């Protein structure tokens, strides 16, 4: 375990020390420092619980990637994940929503965290709509596939697989869901919701198209699996997974730097879990584990849409995701026992 999680353990120690120091510098008291330390731990656990499915999907994609791009994702990718989504993304939200410069956004985060948090929450509708549409496309693209030959929740998955022969089925399903949720919103919010969700749909299709173009080899015209296109896909996917955690983190603290520490620790564990899943070939050993991850993504996408109407605690999201993955793991173990018994 130390081989896979060594860097995560080291980052955890450094991050928690940073959280303690941050609390001391803000409050000047031991209780304030311990409070920051505890919030950092909770944020890390929250991020890990929300990201089991992310690690499984990453591992599935990494198995198809070339060694060079696999290494780049596990090095450059984690830098983008930790610093890009956990620090730069919240700053960009404030820059766009408040129409201020990035330096002013940093000053606002450092000196007036409550106003900073209010601006972030004010952009929640657009973020939830974009993330919901993108993640629903990710999940349905897996299930609505005529070439998929293994079903876990057989009745539903078999029906979705049959629609795989009809092009655009998953897009139509996402559009119907978008229309359903938009009709339940107040009229003043419908335009914002539809604009953001359609943009999420377009980004998914754009990444898919760009991936196919970028991954084509120069002479043969064949698609080279797992190049720059797969890298971009995983980065956008990680960003979409991170929306929920970043927004939810502001319910615990308004301090951007503490949020970056806590969620950054969680991101390091996701990276370690991804490496372990790839190297140990866990996805091939557990038949339904990948199915559980994509069901978890589908549920997360519905929750993100639903959060435009009502608040859903992040712990509910984490428990539902972990529940699907846990059940798929149990089903995989049961299947393996049956196969071993027949042999």
Image: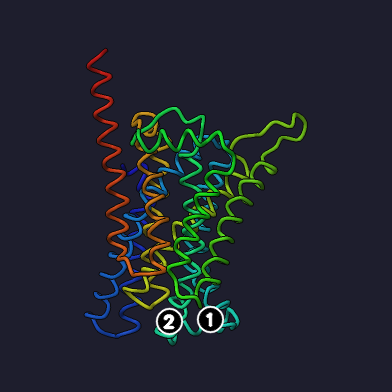
Q: Residue at x 29, y 52 (%)?
A: 320
Decide: few, some or many residues near mark 1? Use Cα within 10 Å; few <14, some 14-19, many ≥20: many
Q: Quadrant of the N terminus?
A: top left
Q: From the image, state whether disc 2 or disc 1 is nearer to you.
A: 2
Q: Where residue 131 appears, x then y in whole percent? A: 48, 60
Hey, which quadrant is residue 33 in on the image?
A: bottom left
Q: Number of numbered discs present?
A: 2
Q: Residue visible at 49% across and 64% down? A: 129
User: Considering only vertical position in the picture, is 52 above or below 26?
Assistant: above
Q: Report the quarter where the C terminus lies.
A: top left
- Judged left or right of residue 178, residue 323 is left
Q: Which mark is residue 175?
A: none
* Rendered view: 106 above or below 289: below
Query: Which residue is identified by label 1?
Result: 105
Q: Is residue 142 left or right of residue 96?
A: left
Give percent across and percent down for residue 293: 38, 44
Q: What residue appears at the point 32 percent right and 44 percent down from the top-left corner?
A: 2
Residue found at the very far top of the displayed protein: 343
Residue 196 horizontal/vertical position (percent): 55, 65
Quadrant position of residue 289: top left
Q: CA distance from mark 2 to mark 1?
A: 13 Å
- Mark 2 or mark 1: which comes first in sequence? 1
Q: Which secondary structure lies at badge 2?
A: helix
- Secondary structure at numbered mark 1: helix
User: Front-most of 162 and 251?
Assistant: 162
Taking the spot 52% from the left edge, 78% from the top edge, the residue there is 94
**Which residue is outermost to the right?**
219
User: For residue 118, which numbered disc appears in the image?
Assistant: 2
User: Label 2 crowding class (10 Å Cα cut-off): few <14, some 14-19, many 20+?
Assistant: some
Q: How is the image coloured?
A: rainbow
């Amino acid at each position: 375990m130390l081989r896979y999680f060594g860097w995560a353990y080291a980052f955890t120690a450094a991050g928690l020390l940073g959280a303690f120091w941050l609390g001391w510098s803000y409050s000047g008291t031991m209780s304030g420092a311990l409070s920051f330390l505890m919030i950092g731990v909770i944020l890390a656990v929250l991020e890990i619980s929300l990201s089991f499915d992310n690690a499984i999907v990453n591992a599935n994609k990494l198995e198809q990637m070339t060694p060079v791009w696999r290494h780049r994702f596990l090095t450059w990718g984690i830098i983008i994940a930790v610093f890009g989504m956990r620090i730069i993304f919240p700053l960009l939200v404030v820059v766009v929503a408040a129409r201020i410069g990035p330096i002013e956004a940093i000053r606002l985060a450092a000196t007036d965290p409550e106003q900073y948090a209010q601006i972030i929450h004010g952009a929640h509708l657009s973020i939830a709509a974009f993330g919901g549409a993108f993640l629903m496309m990710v999940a349905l693209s897996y299930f609505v596939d005529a070439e998929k030959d293994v079903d876990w929740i057989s009745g539903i998955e078999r029906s979705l697989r049959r629609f795989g022969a009809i092009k655009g089925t998953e897009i139509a399903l996402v559009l119907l869901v978008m229309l359903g949720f938009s009709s339940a919103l107040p009229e003043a919010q419908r335009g914002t919701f539809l604009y953001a969700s359609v943009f999420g749909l377009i980004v998914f299709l754009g990444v898919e198209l760009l991936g196919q173009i970028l991954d084509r080899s120069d002479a043969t015209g064949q698609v080279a699996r797992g190049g720059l296109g797969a890298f971009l896909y995983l980065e956008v996917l990680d960003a979409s997974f991170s929306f929920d955690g970043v927004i939810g983190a502001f319910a615990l603290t308004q301090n951007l730097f503490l949020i970056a520490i806590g969620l950054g620790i969680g991101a390091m564990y996701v990276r370690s879990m991804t490496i372990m899943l790839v190297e140990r070939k866990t996805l091939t050993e557990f038949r339904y584990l990948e199915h559980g991850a994509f069901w978890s993504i589908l549920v997360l996408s519905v929750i993100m849409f639903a959060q435009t109407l009502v608040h859903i605690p992040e712990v509910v999201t984490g428990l539902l995701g972990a529940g699907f993955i846990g059940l798929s793991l149990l089903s995989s173990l049961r299947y393996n026992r049956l196969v071993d018994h027949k042999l």
